[in-house]
Amino acid sequence: MIEHLKHRIVRFVILGVAVVLITACGQSDEASSRKDTVKVGVLTALTGANASYGRSTREGVELAVEEINASGILPEGFEAVFEDDQMTSSVGVSAFQRLQTSIKPAVVIGPFGSSVVLAVAPIANRTKTIIISASATADSIADAGDFVFRITPANSRQGADIAVFSYNKLNARTAAVVFQRNDYGQTLRDAFISKFEGTGGKVVAVEGITGGTTDLRAMLTRIQGLEPDVLFFPLHSQESTLLLRQAADVGITAALISADGAMTTELLEGAGSAAEGAYFSTLALGYGESDDKIVEFGKAFQTRYNKKHDVYAAYYYEVTWLVARAIAAVGNDAKTIRDYLYAMNGNRAYRGLTGVTAFDDRGEVNKPFYIYAVKNNAFELYR
């Protein structure tokens, strides 16, 4: 009888161990699956004055993530983890550090703003974490380090193109500039003034404003008194909306032109008829080889969000797919991905919504800017 009980006890113990092992293996497999999911960070302005940029970023990234997971190119799964940088340098640094603590990503998409990119870049290089922005355009980003990339060209190119367009296409011979006092606005200001004056034009007024400004009427009245042919305003979307509305209030007669930072659906909604006829510079979306891609993206975006996309949703959709394809090609290691991106040219260049993306030895791209004009409350290609 005692021997029989012993056998039963041994059998129960063995069964118990087996159950524990099976359970543990199941939990281990689940944990391993969660651990193996490829996670990238995303830094953008989710709150504050520039939250409209963050909405566009999130919409583009999340649509891309859904498509990437459906495509199966990363069988382990692909996830984007967002942190709010409020487009402020100090907040951005803290947000970047939170990402490193929480998920230790090989790649962080963003930051959105130039000032935040420049603030985060030293940490990214020290920790060997790639940051790749689809919107930051300050010239100094080109020298921000080996782990810093962007898919949009620098402001020196954009500001010069706007100056040439103003002089040659708008026949402007005098210009006023109202710029945002940050890396974005100041580099566009400098590039525009240098090229416009070098082409033969004269800049009659230069005024700087800070984010959150609410009244530009006195400044615009002074500018109107100088009767410039063109008013160039490299401002963010919120400040550009304010300028357009108050320029209409004071009767500005100059042609109005801005850069990519102002070209948002929020500007069209906020400025209304005051935006009619204004010009904006941005990367081309929907030319040549990109035609089919932009049409398909537009349909997918409309289906997902029940609205038309803006340029930043397209840019961040683009960069998310680019990152996913790089990881699918070489794995989720920052140094390997970095080397892959630097070698991404010629036949290996990425062809997407914004044309051909090929990086030089500073993580820069060479793409043309195009001019859009507001017509019937919509952005339409001018050239």
Image: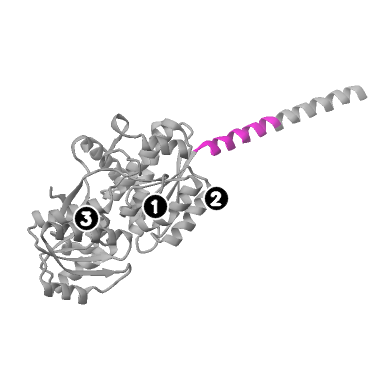
Residue under numbered circle 3: 159
Q: Is residue 203 visible?
A: yes
Q: Residues within 10 Å of mark 2 (few under 14, many from 20)?
A: few
- Whether the residues at callouts 1 and 2 have beta carbons within 8 Å, the answer is no
Amino acid type, mark 1? Pro
Q: Is residue 375 visible?
A: no
Secondary element at tag 1: loop
* x then y, percent, for residue 188: 25, 58
- Tell me which numbered mark, 3 or 2, is placed earlier along the sequence: 2
Could you give the CA–CA distance between mark 1 and mark 3, rounded to whole angstroms?
Answer: 21 Å
- Proximity of marks 3 and 2: CB atoms separated by less than 8 Å: no
Q: Which mark is residue 111?
A: 1
1 or 3: tag closer to the N-terminus: 1
Is 356 or 295 nearer to us in this picture? 356
Callout 3 crowding tier (Cα within 10 Å): few <14, some 14–19, many ≥20: many
Identify the residue position indicated by label 2 in the image.
101
Looking at the image, the residue that sits furthest to the front is: 198
